[in-house]
């Protein structure tokens, strides 16, 4: 395959599948590269779930046309994208697919141009691109490989150049981004992309990786016993298709996808509908899939169609999930709030604060774009406020908000649970002004400091704090403050660093790992050193962080 000068859909599928397998084999190494040495680093997991979520779409595309294969992969990755690196990865492949539009096959030069277009798309998806990240690694590798294409170039020489420069670029990331240099690591997203690219290279050279667990890009075996002659359909059908708009049926250049969306809302939910060029991608959960097909065929013809009984449908990436029951929506309301949290106590707390839906997620459990879209549909409101509570979730929430057309979505860029807790405790819809409410939610986070304590998974030196593996670390957002052998010492040091004496209220949110004796020691410390603080405590049952402390 290495001597090929023309790439078709079959070749594309092989190299992408091998890339996903190579990333899967190196997940832990990528996860451990996170700047902060906290448990459950998730960059590798996010990138793998993103690309692996696209593989079933790729494999179901029966045509060998390169552009159709690339488009199918990109659409699947978009819905399954999670975490900043996962969203950027999905946009790299989305841009590549756009660059291959209408190409049954591609020359090496056309393939190289498509890679560059992928980089352009990825950069445009990030509000403030940062160099020294996966973006830089992708850009420098694509530019170098394209510049070295000549009349003798083959798929092997192109991918070899791509991988070679990617390695050099990845090694340079600590020089471009100080936090990487300080932590003594290379960029984790760039490392994940390199493993994918090395998988491409291995496939081109005939070294295909074997999926010993038979998990990558393959659906779970369907258990037909779950739906038999006595069953009653209640979960509906997951219906997806690509619609090629036809000039004989519609004004293609001025077509408005809302003509499709408004109809789909009458027959189903979990709607995703967007137009790329003259092709419309549709995803809907409905009891009557034929109505969706009948309505859309008046505008064009289908390139692909997938209809699955959701009672039999499985999550194709990580674990089996129960299908969402297709039910009549509750009465539509004007305002709704969605947030992200992990831990039974935290989830219950947010619900008590008036949140309409709490998505189970957080550090190490970043929800996908599709999960956000399902939540938007569930709450059924004109105006929806989303608090992601993690800087690595904001991008997925934003991308989902751009895809969703049935409500006005406001992504309130909360980076931790403390910001969300503080501003939601003052949630007030009485003004009836959607923009003002969004401003108030954003302002409500401004004077909040959220400290977090957990165990370090490796040695590091961050913000001039010397950290040893296994010690407790105390930090706020991206700033490391203290590292000591015990929770209490770390907690004491953290409060000093974040000027607890200048605050009025303190809330401790405890994980199950904190004992009653440790809580008593903390309370004694607070009474002794900070007697003017009004102190509250919650059982959060959260993962990763032993203690989350909120100061206002």
Image (cartoon, rainbow, N blue to C red):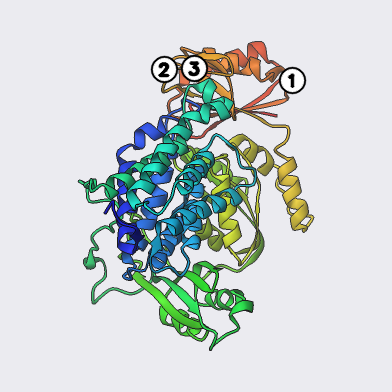
Q: Quadrant of the N terminus?
A: bottom left
Residue of label 3: 487
Q: CA distance from mark 3 to mark 1?
A: 22 Å
Question: Which label's residue is closer to the chain start, 2 or 1?
Answer: 2
Query: Residue 239 at x, y = what percent?
Result: 41, 71
Element at label 1: helix
Circle 3 residues within 10 Å: few <14, some 14–19, many ≥20: many
Return the mark for residue 51: none
Q: Are marks 2 and 3 in contact (CB under 8 Å)?
A: no
Q: CA distance from mark 2 to mark 1?
A: 32 Å
Q: Is residue 255 above or below residue 410?
A: below
Who is closer to the viewer here, 432 or 50? 50
**Left-right relation of 336 to 346:** right
Q: Is residue 327 above or below residue 343?
A: below
Q: Residue furthest bottom?
A: 248
Return the mark for residue 502: 1
Query: Residue 127 at x, y = what percent?
Result: 64, 47
Q: Is residue 165 above or below residue 298?
A: above
Residue 98 visible in the shown view: yes
Q: CA distance from mark 2 to mark 3?
A: 14 Å
Q: Are marks 3 and 1 in contact (CB under 8 Å)?
A: no
Residue of label 2: 469
Residue at 23% over, 67% down: 224
Who is closer to the viewer here, 106 or 123? 106
Q: Quadrant of the C terminus?
A: top right
């Amino acid at each position: 395959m290495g001597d090929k000068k023309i790439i078709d859909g079959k070749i594309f599928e092989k190299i992408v599948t091998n890339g996903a397998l190579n990333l899967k084999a190196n997940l832990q190494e990528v996860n451990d590269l996170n700047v902060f040495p906290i448990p459950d680093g998730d960059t590798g997991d996010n990138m793998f779930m993103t690309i692996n979520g696209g593989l079933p779409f790729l494999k179901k595309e029966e045509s060998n046309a390169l552009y159709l294969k690339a488009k199918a992969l990109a659409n699947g990755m978009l819905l399954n994208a999670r975490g900043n690196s996962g969203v950027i990865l999905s946009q790299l492949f989305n841009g590549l697919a756009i660059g291959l539009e209408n190409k049954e096959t591609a020359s090496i030069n056309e393939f190289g141009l498509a890679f560059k277009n992928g980089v352009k798309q990825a950069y445009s998806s990030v509000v403030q691109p940062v160099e020294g990240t996966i973006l830089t690694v992708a850009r420098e590798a694509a530019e170098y490989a394209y510049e070295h294409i000549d009349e003798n170039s083959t798929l092997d020489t192109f991918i070899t150049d791509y991988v070679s420069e990617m390695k050099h670029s990845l090694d340079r990331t600590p020089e471009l981004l100080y936090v990487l240099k300080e932590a003594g690591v290379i960029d984790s997203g760039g490392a994940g992309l390199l493993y994918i690219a090395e998988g491409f290279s291995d496939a081109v050279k005939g070294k295909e990786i074997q999926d010993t667990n038979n998990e990558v890009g393959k659906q779970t075996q369907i258990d037909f016993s779950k739906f038999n002659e006595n069953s009653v359909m209640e979960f509906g059908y997951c219906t997806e298709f690509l619609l090629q708009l036809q000039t004989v049926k519609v004004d293609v250049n001025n077509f408005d996808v809302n003509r499709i969306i408004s109809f789909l809302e009458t027959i189903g939910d979990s709607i995703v509908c967007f137009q790329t060029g003259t092709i419309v991608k549709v995803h809907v959960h409905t009891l009557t899939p034929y109505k969706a097909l009948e309505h859309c065929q008046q505008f064009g013809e289908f390139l692909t169609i997938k209809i699955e009984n959701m009672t039999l449908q499985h999550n194709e990436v990580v674990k089996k999930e129960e299908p969402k029951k297709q039910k009549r929506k509750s009465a539509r309301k004007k305002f709704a709030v969605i947030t992200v949290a992990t831990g039974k106590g935290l989830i219950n707390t947010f619900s008590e604060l008036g949140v309409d839906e709490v998505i189970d997620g957080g550090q190490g459990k970043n929800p996908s774009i599709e999960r956000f879209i399902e939540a938007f549909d569930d709450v059924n409101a004109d105006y929806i406020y989303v608090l992601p509570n993690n800087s690595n979730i904001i991008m997925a929430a934003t991308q989902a908000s751009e895809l969703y057309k049935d409500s006005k979505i406001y992504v309130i860029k909360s980076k931790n649970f403390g910001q969300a807790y503080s501003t939601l405790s003052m949630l007030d819809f009485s003004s009836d002004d959607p923009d003002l409410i969004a401003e108030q939610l954003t302002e409500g986070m401004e004077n909040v400091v959220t400290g977090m304590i957990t165990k370090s998974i490796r040695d590091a030196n961050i913000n001039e704090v010397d950290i040893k593996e296994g010690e407790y670390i105390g930090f706020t957002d991206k700033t490391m403050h203290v590292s000591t052998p015990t929770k209490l010492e770390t907690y004491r040091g953290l409060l000093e660093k974040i000027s607890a004496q200048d605050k009025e209220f303190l809330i401790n949110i405890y994980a199950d790992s904190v004992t009653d004796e440790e809580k008593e020691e903390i309370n004694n410390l607070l009474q002794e050193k900070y007697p003017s603080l009004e102190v509250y405590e919650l059982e959060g049952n959260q993962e990763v962080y032993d203690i989350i402390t909120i100061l206002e």
